[in-house]
Every structure is written in C-alpha cells, then in structure tokens.
Image (cartoon, rainbow, N blue to C red):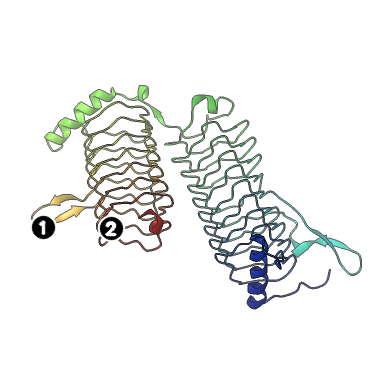
Amino acid sequence: MPPPTKVSQHDINTAVALHEKMAKGKTGGVRLALSFKVAERMDFRNRDLSEAELVGAFLCESTFAHAKMTRANLFGADLTGCDMSDADLSKADLRGVQLKRANLERANLTAADIRDGFIIVRDKDGNFSYHNNQPQGAVLTDAKFAHADMTNAKMSRVFGPRTDLTGCIMRGAILRQADLSNSDLSGVVLTGADLTNANLSNCILHGATLAGALLDNTNLDGADLTASNFGTQDLARVDTSKAVLPVSIDKLEKSVQQIFIDHLDWLKTEGRTGHQADFERVNLADLDAPGVNLSAGRMALSILRNAKLAGGYFQVADFSSAFMAGCDLSGAKLQGAKLDKATLTGAKLRDAELAPMPVDTLNQRVWNTKMKEANLSGADLRGANLSKADLTGSVLRRADLRDANLTDAILLDCDFSGADLRGAVLTGADTRGTAGLENAL
C-alpha cells in the first residue's frame, strides 16, 4: 500500500464545502473522501460530514465538535485525541476505530456501530498486514463518553480501561461480552441493553438504570448497585451474591416512622436526645411522607424513586448520589442541602427552596446548596429558588425552569439542551461553558 497522502486545512475546507453542497442536493457537490489520508490536527467544527468516506483515515487530534457525521464511514479510522464533543455520529460506522483519549462528551451515537473491525492491506511485495499496525480492533482507552447518547448502539467488547461513561444513555445498546470492569458507570441508562456475559465487576453503578436490561451471566462481583434503579426480575438470572446492594427497609433496626420520630427529637433537643436519621444506602422507593422533617438527615446513596416528599424539610441534608427519579419535592425546603451527583430525572421541584442556609447570623455565614453533576433531566423546577446554588456540570436537558431564581448560581458546564428558562432570573449567574442556554431563554 503506498504511503498515505497528507492533506492541508485548505484542502479540507475546499473538500468539505463541496461535500456540504452535495448534502444539500445542490449541483456540483462531491462526497468527502479522506479514506487512508492523513488529516491530523484539522478543524471540522460545526461542519456537515454526514455520509462522508473516512475509512482508515489518520485524523489524530482533529476537532469535530458539533459536527454532523450521521452515517459517516469511519471504519478503522484513527481518532486518537480527537474532540468530538456534541458531534452527531448517529448510525455512523465506527468499527475498529482508535478513540484513545478522544472526547465524545454529549455526542449522539444513536445506533452507531462501535464493534471491533480490522483493515487488512497488501504491501508492494504482496504481503498482508493490519492497517496502521492495529490488530486489536476498536480501542477506547481513556476516552470520554460522559452524557453521550448511545441508544441502540453496537459495542460488544470494545471498551478499554479508564473510559468515562458517567451519565451515558445506552438504551437498547448491545454490550454482549463487553469488559466494563472497574468502570464508573454512575448515572448510566442501560434500559433494555443487552449485557449478556458482560463483565461489570467492581463497577460503580450509583444512579444507573438497569430496568429491563438483559443480564444473563453478567459478572457483577464487587459491583456497587447502591442507588441503582432495577427490579428484582431484572436480577433474577444473575449472581448478585458478591455485589453491593441497597439495604431493604425491612432490614432496618427500627421502623421508618420511628426513625422519623427519633430524628425530630434529635433536632428539637439539638442532639441531646433522639437519633439522627440515617438512611444512607437504604431503598426508600415510593416512600409516602409529605411534609416530613429530615433536616440534616443522612440520605446519601439512598433510593427515593417516586417518593412523595412534597412540602418536606431537608435543610443541610445529604442526598449525595441518591437515586431520586420522579421524586415529588414540590415546595420542599432544601436550603444548604447536598445533592451532588444525585439522579433527579423527572423530579418535581416546583417552588422548592434551594437558596443558601444561614448558619451564623452574627457573622453572616451561610451554606450554599450543592448540586454538582446532578442529573435534572426533565425535572420540574418552575418557580424554584436556586440562588447561589452550585450546579457545576449538572444536566438539565428538557428541564422546566420557568420563573426559577438562578441569581448568582454557579452554572459552569451545565447542559440546558431543550430546557425552558422563560422568565428565569440569571442575574450574576456564572454560565461559562453551558450548552443550549441561549435557546432555552
């Protein structure tokens, strides 16, 4: 095979312009063909590369952020170190790609094919060898897929160590025999995914949704399923004897109601009598306790799916990494609470109070509410008071924030795609790195 041809940014710009012309159905357009060419450190940002031919291309360190690459053929391409954040790679052929250190955060990989694939080439002497000396197929080591959409993607066995999959949407994905051991899968949506014979040993699955997933012979040894969403039927055909599971309420030493009573006594006497409520790692799904007072309670890694807690008091309570999808917290008092990495998809937080909690009136000291990297997709936050709350890295896709108070809130790197912020107050808010904010206002 002859040495690969190098192309310049000027060549790229010319070729992509002709490709975009073709994509729009205009005369004179020509499909982009960079197969087996060297186009390293090139800029493809915001360009339309749909159905482009990029087989075996050397594209290391190139930028594809926000590019449209639907049905693009990237079979065997080297995408090492590429920035593909927010790119649309739906139905793309990514078999055998090299994605080491690549950034695919928030990328759309719906129905993409990321399985192993090999390109065999013949040299001038007639000998066969692997293209780019890569016999191992697809490599995803150190790649970042945080909050990417991989619905119905095919990915059997391709993942490497240190791959960041937190918050990924992998509904219906094919992950048969995939080795995801020791990975952080917090917040991953695996509804209906095929994990037959997959290795999830020692994985962290806080906030992950496994409902309807095929878990036949899946290795869950050492996997932390605390604060995960699954049904008993989902785990019926898998060995969970060595997994870390949430605590059932019938395993508690006291009834839930008695714990509430003892906690209220603890609050009233400032700890002299009673006991602080500790529901850490406890399954409280469907709990019906509107108006309950659990201020300063320990709720980290608890399951509060569809719990009814409207009008409750939760000042400075710790809900870190709790699974609270569909939870009703309408009008709840959450000043100074800690909700870092909590899953609040579809939660009801209308008119909730999440402003700072005064802890020392004389010295004007307060505790700000923390919601770093929380998942608030589809949450109802109408009229909620989020002033000075820290939502760094949180996902608020399709959230309803109409008339919410976000004065001086920290919104660094938040995703507001499809959200509704009409009437919201953002005076003094730090909005650096946000996605979808302009369209949401």
Q: Assign the C terminus to one quadrant of the image.
A: bottom left
Give the residue number, with chain letter if any, for mark 1: 363
Instruction: Give residue 154's mark.
Output: none
Q: Which residue is identified by label 2?
A: 426
Question: Nearest the camera: 384 or 41?
Answer: 384
- Dot 2: within a 10 Å radius of its alpha carbon, few (fewer than 14), some, or many (20 or more) residues? some
Q: Nearer the viewer, residue 107 or 426?
A: 426
Q: Quadrant of residue 10?
A: bottom right
**Tag 2: residue type?**
Leu
Instruction: Return the x and y of residue 183 as percentages of the image width and height.
Output: 53, 47
Q: Residue at 32% x, 45% y: name it.
A: 339
Relative to 224, is 136 above or below?
below
Image quarter (top left, top right, bottom left or bottom right) of the N terminus? bottom right
Q: Position of residue 343 (x, y in %)?
A: 40, 42
Q: Amino acid at mark 1?
A: Asn
Q: Residue furthest left?
A: 362
Q: In front: 422, or 9?
A: 422
Q: Position of residue 12 (x, y in %)?
A: 65, 72
Q: Picture coordinates of residue 372 (x, y %)? A: 35, 52
The vertical placement of 373 against 349, above or below, is below
Locate residue 28 relative to residue 111 in the image: left or right.
right
Neighbour class for label 1 at 10 Å: few (<14), some, many (≥20)? few
